[in-house]
Image (spheres, rainbow, N blue to C red):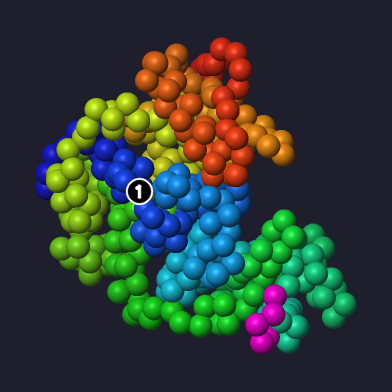
Amino acid sequence: MTVASVADLLRFRLLAQGLEDEGERTPQAVVERMLAVQAQDFGAACWALGIRAPGTTQADVIAALDAGDIIRSWPMRGTLHFVPPADLRWMLSITTERMLNGLTLRHRQLELETPDFAKAQDVVTAAIAGGGSIGRAELMELWEAHGIATAGQRGYHLIYWLAQNGVLCWGPSYKTQQALVLLDEWVPHSRELAHDEALAEFFVRYVAGHGPATVKDFVWWTKGTVAGAKTALAVAGDRLTSIEVDGTEYWLTSELASRAVARPRTPSDKNALYMLPGFDEYLIGYQNRDLVLDPEFANVIVPGGNGVFAPILVSRGRVAGTWKRTTNAKRVTVDPRPFAPLSNAESTRIARSVKAYGRFLGLTGEVAAGEVAAAEPARRG
């Protein structure tokens, strides 16, 4: 095992995440490498792909979703993610049982039983089979018309159960959201992996897009088990390697390790500053975030621990502030909130990032007028 520094680890992560290199060519290529990109905030998730695929636009991301090149569903943690279509079913084969077992009490509280899920499946399948789709509100109305109550989160849990069991997924654009489609029709061809092979693929693909990361990080990300992670490591074999940082073992792909050695850091890399969205995988994709986020500022990123992650500025591999935006028909204005005063180089980088973000949205991007205000750290008791 190679001993490495925190600086090395952060550089490897920036490479794995597709930030500190030439980037991917398409949004679907980003998703393919990262395996899953958290996507409950649709606009934020689109920018997470856009910043990793320079030159693409939000319209490109939506076009990839409409074409079925990227799929949005709940592959793990009960959270929406963008995933490669061919990989969704084997991911669900690993995660579904634990996710649904964890909802047994909630389903009992909602008076949802096996016949309710079966009837809901029959009704929606009959309505959209043959290439159809249906909006969320329209599906609620359809179920209500067939005597299936949807109030009090019942409707959400019915959709989630059907998605976990490979019946439904989110498909093409519909109004301001996406329509639901039958997974078997939207993604007719999938990779088939045996259980242990799927575990190994999960681990390898996770660290390919997030490494170096620990076993605990992987277990948290998938809501899996340590035993499953150990099986994954055994099956993955020499596709993986590890480094030791401050006495902790971190895993990465052998390919990433070779790429990092072949690509020495440049002065441009050292001055890089990234304007990442809320819920970005660079921060949220790990059980332990202290390496990239000073705990003193954790409450700034997730106010009150409410689970809502603010957009972040990342400099030299660490979270360096937050940002907010306002938009109108022609422009997006970004208000950076760094944790400390910015250098001239960082200010220039922010201005470039804002312009790139504007182009991604199809708008003019500009930095808010006036002096950049520093974010206040959380006060210690």
Image position, residue 39 (x, y; %): 55, 53
Q: Nearer the viewer, residue 67 or 248?
A: 67
Corner quadrant of residue 51: top left
Q: Is residue 324 above or below residue 170?
A: above
Image position, residue 189 (x, y; %): 46, 82
Q: Nearer the viewer, residue 151 or 145?
A: 145
At a point 30% along the width and 74% down the height, the residue shown is: 197
Secondary structure mostly seen in magenta is loop
Corner quadrant of residue 129: bottom right
Q: Is residue 362 left or right of residue 52?
A: right
Query: From this viewpoint, is residue 158 visible?
Result: yes
Corner quadrant of residue 207: bottom left
Type of amino acid at the residue the image marks with label 1: Gly
Q: Residues within 10 Å of mark 1 (few under 14, many from 20)?
A: some
Task: Please tell me whether residue 22 belongs to the stretch shown in magenta.
Answer: no
Q: Which residue is mark 1?
A: 23
At a point 65% along the width and 34% down the height, the residue shown is: 331
Q: Does dot 1 land on a helix, a strand or a loop? A: loop
Image position, residue 259 (x, y; %): 19, 49
Segment tinted magenta in the rendering: 129-133
Q: Is residue 101 above or below residue 53?
A: below
Image position, residue 190 (x, y; %): 43, 79
